[in-house]
Image (tube, rainbow, N blue to C red):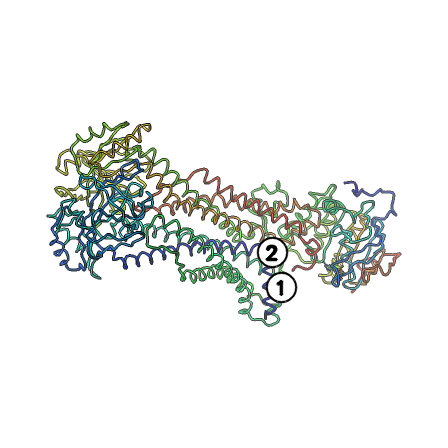
């Protein structure tokens, strides 16, 4: 693998984790053509908590999928450090996801036949330098639910298991697509707290997609998306604590 | 105009075409066999009964030594008898140019100036005999074909010691000889045995029977009591050397055809049942899976106001489309195979015309059975889905509850990787589904055992029976019983290595209310030619005063060793004696009854006589031996082992092998269908979970392992069960094709089992490859959206 991603150098704090230039994704052809991403330029530095806002259909999920190596762009470049994601093959992207990326989804996507601990262990078995499943679940305040199956957990608890599963490998980036979309306010806050804490303690670059503008206050950086383009980027000098958010 | 619901149906089918094809094909295989065998049965039964009626096939038959013509009128006066046809029936030896071995035949008389009342002939080629004509014969088609005889050719016959040349006027068929074979011989040899017809007068004069008859055929009034008439005829004919009248149930050609129909009937029930139950399993699995995937769709349809009935109808339509396809493919396949088999049966069974007749009622049965199978599959699944209130179904199905599996609770669990856990917990969570898959796989493994068991049995018969059990090269029958001096003459023939004489006599064996007419053979105990062996191939000694019969005969007579059997001798002094059944012999064709020769001769009270012998012959002197044999005037018939074996190979073996290869193809289709279907279902049910694994960093191979592990575990359970099941199937089938005419030994070889395992393994392997390919195209992004 000539193009392999490398671990970050500890000193180079300001280094960009992701650099996108003219990133374009076109679905379909002819009249059915949809430009889901239409020339996105973006730099995401180490350790930040980024919130991605935008109307439905503006291309947020598409962008996140690119960042996570699930999909490849039609045009443009996308660098993860010095690893060119836009040109990576299936095999390389699998390894990239395995070693560097943590995913959290709106519908949790836990494996129903595995307990909380085993869902996390699934990842720690294949990652190079993982924390223990217990430690990961501890980070999201789920120490008491280690041997519960997904069916025995509430939605918020399931989502926190998903976060533990995502961060147990100590990923460089944590990508969350509407992580609170299926949850009520109180549970949503608990989940966001878990994400925020992971970002703070592990220094993981975290990208959260949401429809909830209130969540912009907890971010270092807020990106407004529309029509497949970055419409506007805004920087908060101080992140509001999650517990103060209300919607 | 298609409704939108129908549109959905078509799209669903499109997405599941692989599975739909697999289910339809399995069902089609079962239906093809159903259509094929039911139609063949119908073809045979209709053709036969039409032939019997149009050509007035007799109900009863009797052989006697000689009776004046007036006796026939007395027979006709017996209550219940409607028509009597007296005639002459004699055994002759033949000299066929170009044939080394002596051929023999049966000659029947024909009334000269009117067509026969009974057993009328069908003229295939040439002409009828000239009324009052001399030196003319008609020949049965099977013999004519085997020896390439045509009208105008000539044959030489030894009639009552006098050689006479005859011109063949025509080639004919007779309802009495649909299956042409020498009486007492279960296997035909059409080259060395033929049936002929001549005008009454020349035949009668040659045998000093003018104005008399030695054979009777008769028809009964509707409702006449057959046993009563037989008893009356026997009483009347005893003074004239009557050999016992018998009905169609003892008529060799009739038995042979009935046996074939019986075998087809067994096959027409057994096989389709197995195949169609597999198809029902598969439909159920497929529909349940479709329904659980379409939970929300169903809820929405219900929320819009569709009634349960409409929704059930929707999914039933889906199933019925599969059934419709299966019925079409199955029917066409069955018709095709049926035609193929009819061509083969024409070689065995001589009808004026045997055509494939589609049994239309089978189409309805097929449709009903197929629909039934699908209905069973759909109803359970749909009822479950239709019960859900719409509001509940709108929510995504909650994660199913799991628990640690039994395997893990034994403590092995800690050693297992998590991917393995996913596999076993899945199996344990849906035990019924796992059971169904195991059952389907076991059935398809089992089905694979049957065709090879048939093939191995035929091979065993061809090799073992003919080489190890029957070691003689040729059997020779004499015209009349003779004292032992004849053996010395026969021993002088060139090339004779060993000779074993026998004494055969026509008898009727009775036990309880069961009876059978056959030839009882007296032979030396411990002979090495025609060996008498039991089921384990151990030699059975012929005791001084006991009888050994085929186990099939014992089964028919409901007799067991130790029972006393009554033997009525039908020739000579016509003695009757009781003799103990001392052993059961295993033989593969016909039915035999055997005794020690001297003991038999004592009971017959005619001194130490023989009327035939078996020979082994030096192969270098084979042709000189046959030529010399032709010149022995007392010889009535010969049976050359190699010719019989060749005939068996070309007829019975060929037909069984054709059927076995059809079943083999079907069994392979089922094996593939079941495995493929199972793999597709797991893939579809678990697509989301598998895609998630891929998203969080598992490679294709690692994800495939989860599915493969499941399939391997299921196969590990199914294959041994399947081998056991197959053993049962094969035993059942072999027993059911065992008839009075031909029986097959049950052969279950390691090779057979290995083959079945191999096919299932290859089927699994290929199905897995398809699934792994599908895994590659798994929609990773789609799996992260809301559940379907
Ligand atoms: N597989 C696909 N094929 C065709 N078009 C697609 C596909 N996936 C997404 N699109 C289109 O691309 C555009 C962007 O989709 P995307 O899912 O990124 O939007 P989003 O910003 O995440 O919206 P939402 O907030 O509703 O989730 C949409 O117009 C969508 O219809
Ligand atoms: Mg989205």
The foreground one among B149 and B44 is B149
Q: Is residue B598 above or below residue B436?
A: above
The foreground one among A222 and B18 is B18
Q: What numbered label is drawn on residue B322?
A: none
Q: Position of residue B90 (x, y in %)?
A: 20, 45
Q: Position of residue B268 (x, y in %)?
A: 39, 54
Q: Chain of mark 1?
A: B
Q: Position of residue A18 (x, y in %)?
A: 83, 50
Task: Kindly tell me whether residue A135 is visible in this rendering.
Answer: no
Q: Do the residues marked 1 and 2 share a common chain?
A: yes
Left or right of B128, for residue B412: right
Q: Is label 1 within 8 A of ligand 1 (CB to nearest ligand atom)?
A: no
How far apart are the two marked residues, 1 and 2, measured between alpha carbons?
16 Å
Determine the image quadrant of residue B636.
Answer: top left
Q: Chain of mark 2?
A: B
Task: Kindly tell me whether residue B75 is visible in this rendering.
Answer: yes
Left or right of A154, for residue B610: left
Label 2 crowd bin: few (<14), some (14–19), many (20+), radius 10 Å: few
Which quadrant does ligand 1 occupy?
bottom right
Q: Position of residue A175 (x, y in %)?
A: 77, 53
The reply to whether discs 1 and 2 touch (Cβ–Cβ < 8 Å) is: no
Disc 2 element: loop
Residue pointed to by mark 2? B400
Residue pointed to by mark 1? B296
Q: Nearer the viewer, mark 1 or mark 2?
A: 1
Q: Residue furthest bottom?
A: B305
Which quadrant would the C terminus of chain B be assigned to in this image? bottom right
Left or right of B356, for residue A200: right
Q: Is residue B32 above or below residue B520?
A: below
The foreground one among B675 and A208 is B675
């Amino acid at each position: 693998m000539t193009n392999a991603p490398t671990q970050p150098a500890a000193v180079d704090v300001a280094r960009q984790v992701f650099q996108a230039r003219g990133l374009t994704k076109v679905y379909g052809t002819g009249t059915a053509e949809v430009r889901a991403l239409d020339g996105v330029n973006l730099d995401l530095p180490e350790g930040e908590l980024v919130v991605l806002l935008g109307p439905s259909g503006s291309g947020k999920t598409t962008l996140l999928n690119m960042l996570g190596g699930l999909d490849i762009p039609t045009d443009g470049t996308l660098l993860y450090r010095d690893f060119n994601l836009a040109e990576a093959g299936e095999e390389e992207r699998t390894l990239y996801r395995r070693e560097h990326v943590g995913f959290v989804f709106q519908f949790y996507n836990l494996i129903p036949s595995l307990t909380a601990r085993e869902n996390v262990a699934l990842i720690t078995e294949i990652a190079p330098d993982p924390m223990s499943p217990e430690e990961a679940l501890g980070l999201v305040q789920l120490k008491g639910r280690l041997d519960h199956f997904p069916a025995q957990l509430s939605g918020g608890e399931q989502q926190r298991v998903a976060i533990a599963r995502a961060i147990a490998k100590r990923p460089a980036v944590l990508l969350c697509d509407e992580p609170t979309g299926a949850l009520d306010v109180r549970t949503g806050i608990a989940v966001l707290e878990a994400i925020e804490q992971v970002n703070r303690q592990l220094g993981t670059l975290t990208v959260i997609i949401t429809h909830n503008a209130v969540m912009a206050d907890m971010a270092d950086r807020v990106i407004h998306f529309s029509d497949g383009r970055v419409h506007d980027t805004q920087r908060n000098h101080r992140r509001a604590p999650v517990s103060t958010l209300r919607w | 105009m298609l409704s939108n619901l129908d549109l959905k149906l078509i799209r669903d089918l499109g997405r599941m075409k692989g599975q739909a094809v697999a289910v339809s094909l399995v069902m089609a295989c079962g239906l093809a066999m159903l259509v094929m065998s039911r139609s063949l049965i119908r073809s045979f039964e209709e053709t036969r009964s039409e032939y019997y009626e149009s050509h007035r096939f007799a109900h009863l038959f009797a052989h006697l030594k000689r009776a004046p013509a007036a006796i026939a009128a007395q027979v006709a006066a017996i209550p219940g008898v409607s028509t009597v046809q007296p005639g002459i029936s004699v055994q002759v030896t033949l000299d066929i140019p170009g044939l080394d071995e002596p051929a023999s035949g049966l000659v029947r008389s024909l009334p000269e100036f009117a067509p026969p009342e009974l057993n009328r002939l069908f003229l295939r080629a040439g002409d009828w005999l000239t009324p009052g004509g001399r030196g003319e014969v008609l020949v049965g088609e099977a013999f004519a074909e085997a020896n390439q005889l045509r009208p105008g050719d000539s044959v030489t016959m030894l009639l009552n010691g006098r050689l006479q040349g005859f011109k063949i006027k025509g080639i004919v068929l007779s309802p009495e000889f649909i299956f042409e074979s020498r009486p007492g011989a279960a296997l035909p040899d059409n080259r060395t045995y033929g049936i002929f017809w001549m005008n009454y007068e020349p035949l009668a004069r040659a045998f000093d029977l003018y104005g008399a008859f030695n054979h009777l055929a008769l028809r009964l009034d509707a409702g006449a009591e057959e046993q009563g008439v037989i008893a009356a005829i026997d009483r009347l004919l005893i003074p004239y050397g009557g050999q016992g009248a018998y009905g169609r149930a003892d008529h060799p050609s009739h038995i042979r055809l009935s046996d074939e129909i019986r075998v087809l009937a067994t096959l027409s029930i057994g096989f389709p049942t197995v195949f169609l139950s597999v198809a029902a399993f598969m439909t159920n699995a497929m529909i349940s899976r479709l329904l659980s995937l379409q939970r929300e769709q169903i809820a929405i349809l219900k929320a819009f106001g569709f009634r349960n009935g409409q929704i059930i109808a929707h999914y039933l339509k889906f199933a019925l489309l599969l059934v419709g396809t299966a019925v079409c493919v199955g029917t066409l396949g069955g018709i095709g195979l049926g035609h193929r088999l009819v061509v083969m049966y024409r070689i065995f069974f001589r009808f004026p015309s045997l055509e494939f007749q589609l049994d239309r009622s089978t189409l309805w049965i097929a449709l009903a059975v197929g629909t039934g199978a699908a209905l069973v599959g759909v109803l359970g699944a749909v009822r479950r889905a239709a019960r859900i209130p719409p509001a509940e179904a709108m929510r995504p199905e909650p994660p199913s509850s799991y628990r640690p599996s039994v395997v893990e609770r034994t403590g092995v669990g800690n050693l297992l990787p998590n991917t393995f856990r996913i596999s076993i917990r899945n199996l344990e969570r849906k035990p019924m589904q796992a059971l169904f898959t195991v059952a389907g796989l076991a059935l398809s493994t089992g089905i694979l055992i049957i065709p090879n068991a048939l093939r191995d049995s035929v091979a065993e018969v061809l090799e073992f029976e003919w080489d190890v059990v029957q070691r003689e090269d040729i059997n020779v029958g004499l015209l009349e019983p003779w004292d032992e001096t004849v053996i010395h003459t026969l021993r002088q023939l060139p090339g004779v290595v060993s000779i074993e004489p026998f004494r055969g006599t026509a008898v009727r064996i009775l036990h309880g209310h069961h009876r059978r007419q056959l030839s009882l053979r007296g032979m030396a105990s411990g002979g090495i030619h025609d060996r008498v062996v039991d089921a384990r191939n151990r030699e059975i000694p012929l005791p001084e005063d006991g009888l050994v019969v085929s186990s099939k005969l014992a089964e028919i007579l409901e007799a067991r060793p130790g029972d006393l059997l009554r033997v009525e001798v039908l020739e000579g002094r016509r003695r009757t004696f009781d003799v103990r059944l001392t052993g059961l012999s295993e033989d593969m064709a016909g039915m035999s009854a055997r005794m020690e020769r001297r003991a038999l001769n004592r009971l017959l009270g005619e001194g130490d006589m023989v009327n035939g012998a078996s020979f082994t012959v030096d192969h270098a002197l084979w042709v000189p031996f046959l030529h010399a044999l032709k010149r022995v005037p007392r010889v009535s018939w010969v049976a050359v082992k190699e010719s019989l074996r060749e005939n068996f190979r070309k007829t019975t073996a060929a037909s069984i092998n054709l059927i076995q290869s059809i079943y083999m193809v079907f069994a392979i289709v089922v094996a593939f269908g079941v495995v493929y279907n199972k793999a597709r279902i797991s893939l579809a049910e678990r697509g989301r979970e598998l895609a998630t694994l891929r998203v969080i960093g598992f490679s294709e191979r690692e994800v495939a392992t989860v599915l493969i592990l499941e399939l391997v575990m299921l196969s590990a359970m199914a294959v041994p069960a399947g081998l056991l099941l197959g053993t049962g199937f094969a035993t059942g089938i072999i027993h059911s094709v065992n008839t009075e005419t031909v029986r097959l030994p049950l052969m279950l070889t390691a090779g057979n089992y290995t083959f079945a395992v191999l096919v299932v393994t290859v089927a699994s392997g290929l199905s897995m490859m398809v699934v792994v390919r599908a895994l590659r195209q798994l929609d990773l992004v789609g799996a992260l959206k809301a559940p379907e």
